[in-house]
Image: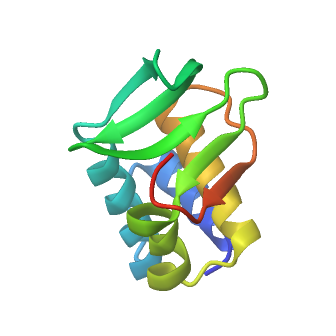
Amino acid sequence: MDSLQFHRLHKLHRLTGRLPVNEKYCAIIRFFEDFFDGLIIEVDLDEHPTDLVYHKNGTRYMRQCSQNGRLWCIYDGYWAFFENEIGLNYADTQDVVQTMMSVHTKRNVETPCRQTWSTI
C-alpha cells in the first residue's frame, strides 16, 4: 500500500460509510480508532508551554509545535507501525498520518516527522 491507494480507499470509505475490503487500510483505521480512544491532548506548561502534547497511558506519542504546526511523532509504538506493519515509506507515512490526524483532531497538521528517541 502507498499513500495514493490509502487516499482512494479513504475517500471511498467516507463516501459509502463502509470499510473497503483491504487488510492494510482496515489495520490503519483500527490503529487510529484505538489510538484516539483515551488519548489526552494538552499543553505541557513545564516543558513545551506553547505546544500541544498527545499522550495516553503515561506515554507521549506526539508533540505539535504551535508556531509552525509541525507534528513530531514517537517512533516506537507509533511511527514504527506504519513502516513495519503496513510497509509505508517515510513520505507515505507522513501523508497518511497528516491526513488522519487532521480528520480526527479537526486541526491543521503540517508535515509529521518521526522522532528516533523514545520521548517527545
Image quadrant in which you'd find residue 7: bottom right
Task: Determine whether 25 is above or below 78 in the image.
Answer: below
Instruction: Say whether residue 117 is visible.
Output: yes
Coloration of the structure image: rainbow
Instruction: Residue at 62% x, 78% y: name it.
Output: 88
Instruction: Say whether residue 4 is visible.
Output: no
Instruction: Residue at 70% x, 57% y: name it.
Output: 95
Instruction: Residue at 45% x, 60% y: name it.
Output: 118
- What x and y, as percent, mark residue 59? 31, 47
Outermost residue to the front: 46
Task: Determine whether 85 is above or below 45 in the image.
Answer: below
- What x and y, as percent, mark residue 82? 52, 72
Report the side of 69 relative to 40 (left or right): right
Check the picture and name the quadrant holding the N terminus.
bottom right
Report the side of 58 relative to 88 (left or right): left
- What x and y, as percent, mark residue 77? 38, 65
Instruction: Residue at 40% x, 49% y: name it.
Output: 17
Question: As rendered, which of 16 and 68 lies closer to the eye?
Answer: 68
Question: As rendered, which of 8 and 115 lies closer to the eye?
Answer: 115
Task: Determine whether 38 is above or below 85 in the image.
Answer: above
Report the side of 65 relative to 68 (left or right): left
- What x and y, as percent, mark residue 101? 54, 42
Image quadrant in which you'd find residue 23: bottom left
- Tell me how many marks there are: 0
